[in-house]
Each structure stands twice: as structure tokens, then as C-alpha cells.
Amino acid sequence: MERVPAAGYRIIGLPVAGLQRSMSASNLALPAKVLRSLRKAGEIIRDFKPDVVVGVGGYASAPTLWKAASYGIPTLIQEQNSYAGLANRMLSRRAKKICTAYPGMDRFFPASKIILTGNPVRENIHPYSAEEKAAGQRFFCLNPSLPTVLIVGGSGGCGTFNSVMRTTCRTNGGAFPYQIIWQSGKGYTEQTQEIFSRLGGVSQTRDGVRIWGNLRNCDFISRMDLAFAAADLVVSRAGAGTISELCAVGKAAIFVPSPNVAEDHQTHNAMSLVDIDAAAMVCDSRASTDLFPAVEELLKNSARRSVLEQNILKLARPDAARDIAAEVLGLIDDKKHEDIQ
């Protein structure tokens, strides 16, 4: 709701909410919210008069795609995860095309509708040259002779990662034998400042980067391209977008899937790479004891990191955005041809 208007596009929210899998009073209000959302989606479609409607998953897209299909407007689903969500599985019956990021999605969708495109990634996310890596090291004030670990929990941060960092810094006094770029999230600023206070305070701040010893901390990393370029190993959640970016840059990664997502899809995402030796994984419940030993083991084993890098890069689909756009435009052309006939 912030990024879309900031990019210059109009955005309209719907009152729809997700179904809670456990017994919850909020589920009682769900039918009314769905009906209001369907009515509002119908108003949006009649006002905007789209030639095609694209859904990228989740309950928020369901009312609009449902109404579009009922009006005879072609719809396309972009399923980002390796395990399709309930909304997309239901909507797939009426969708014309389904663009997926992983193979084997015919267990969820009609095979005749599936196009394997991958997920769109930003243009500056790609395998980096030595010069680009050096630029990343300069931006984050890193020592080129030491390995660097990027710990990123998404734009909002990750409570598990921050808790592990707090415990580890308390144990080792912040004395890491390697460098860490740690994105902690704006919602955790106070907790992060407490960690640095215990270490004796931040030695300096540059371009929003807090520096203490071998630690580099940001609430939010605006230059993810430079962070990826500088990193020798990445620790992250296993959201679809992050995985696609790591495939595009070809970085060795340890995934810690979030347990707080619908149908545990992050674990499915991570395992789709672990099963083909393209990434490592640590369970969220084991992160406090197993994460840093896994990091240190990979940092010591350059041959193992190289295998992971080669295998994850094979999964990259740098033309995903273009391929999805081509399918959208193709649906418009097909509809125009049908109307003429």
C-alpha cells in the first residue's frame, strides 16, 4: 500500500481477509468481508474496463479474479511458490493461463494452462563481477580479505534472525571472525540499538549502515544489489521473491523458512532447492542452536559453496518478467480475435 503509490500507480484496497486455519472469531466476519470485496471488485472492473486481469496469489487477489472471470474477462495467475495456495488452486479452474516459478505444478493446476516462467526480479539482480563485488565491499565498508555473510529477513525484518544475533552477540561479545551484513527491519530498531549498546555503542554510521567491528547493520537495505554482490553466503527466509533473486545472483544460501505462513509454503520452497543440492536449510525452531554452526561450516568449505552456487544459478530465469508480460499480451490478442469472430 506504500510502494505502489510511490511508484506512481493507483492502488485500491479490498476489505477481504484470510481464513484462519485455527478456530478464530475473526472467521465469523469473513463471509461479509468477501461479499463486500466482490462488490467492490465488480465496481473496480466496471470502472477500469481491463482487457485482462492478473493475480499473483493470496486471498487479496481472489475477489477481483473471480469477478473478472464472471464478466468474461481473461485472467492469468502468477503462482510464485512451489506449493500453490488455496486461492490460486480455486481460481485456476477459470484462469486462461497460469505462470509458475517451479516445475511439477501440474499437481495443483491443469497442465494445459501452465507456463513455466519463473518469478520477476529486478534488473540489477544478476551474477556480479569482481568489480561489482568490490563496489559492494566499499559501500558497506568491508574488508576484502574476510568472507561476508548477508543475513536478511525481508523488508520488515525477522524476529528469529534478530533473536539469534542478540544471543550470539551476548555470547561472543560481537567478535565474529567473518563479516556480517545484517538487515534487522524497521520494527526492530529499538532491540537492535540495545544490542549495540551492550557492545559499547556503534563505532560509526554511514549511508544508514551501523558499523561495529565486523558487524554491518541496517534497518532496511536500499541497495540489495550491492549487498548481494558483497556476500559470500546468504542467510534468509524462503519467500518466493527472495529465492528467485538468489537464483538470479547465484549465491550459496541457507534458508530458514518462516513457520508463520499459509500452508507452510516457505518450507516447500526451500526444500525444492535443498532436494537438488542448490541450497541448505535450517528449521526455524533450530535456528538458535544450528544456524551459526551451519554458517561457519559453509564458510570453511569453499568447494561446497561452489556446488550450491552452480546449482542455484541453473534455476535462474532472468527473462521471467518479459515472458509473463508476453503471456498477458497474448491473452489480450486472443480476446480481440474472439470478439472479431
Image (cartoon, grey):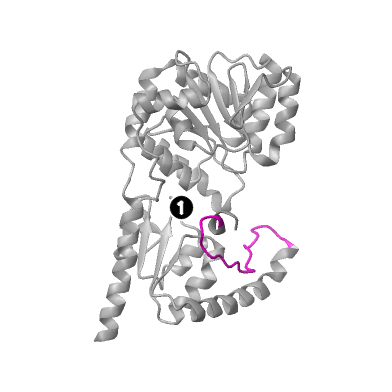
Residue 20 drawn in magenta = yes
Residue at 50 percent across and 81 percent down: it is: 46
Q: Which residue is mark 1?
A: 83
* Quadrant where the C terminus is found in the figure: bottom left
Q: Nearer the viewer, residue 282 or 228?
A: 228
Q: Nearer the viewer, residue 101 or 185?
A: 185
* Quadrant where the N terminus is found in the figure: bottom right
Residue at 58 percent across and 29 percent down: it is: 182
User: Would residue 193 be found to the left or right of residue 161 on screen?
Assistant: right
Give above or below for 266 relative to 31: above
Give above or below for 51 relative to 79: below
* Dominant secondary structure (helix, strand or loop) of the stretch shown in magenta: loop
Measured as percent of width and height from the top left, residue 92 is found at 42, 67
Total numbered circles: 1
Q: Residues within 10 Å of mark 1 (few under 14, many from 20)?
A: many
Measured as percent of width and height from the top left, residue 213 is found at 61, 16
- Residue span colored magenta: 6-24
Give above or below for 263 relative to 124: below
Give above or below for 162 relative to 29: above
What's under tag 1, amino acid-wise? Answer: Tyr
Measured as percent of width and height from the top left, residue 338 is found at 27, 82
Helix, strand or loop status at disc 1: loop
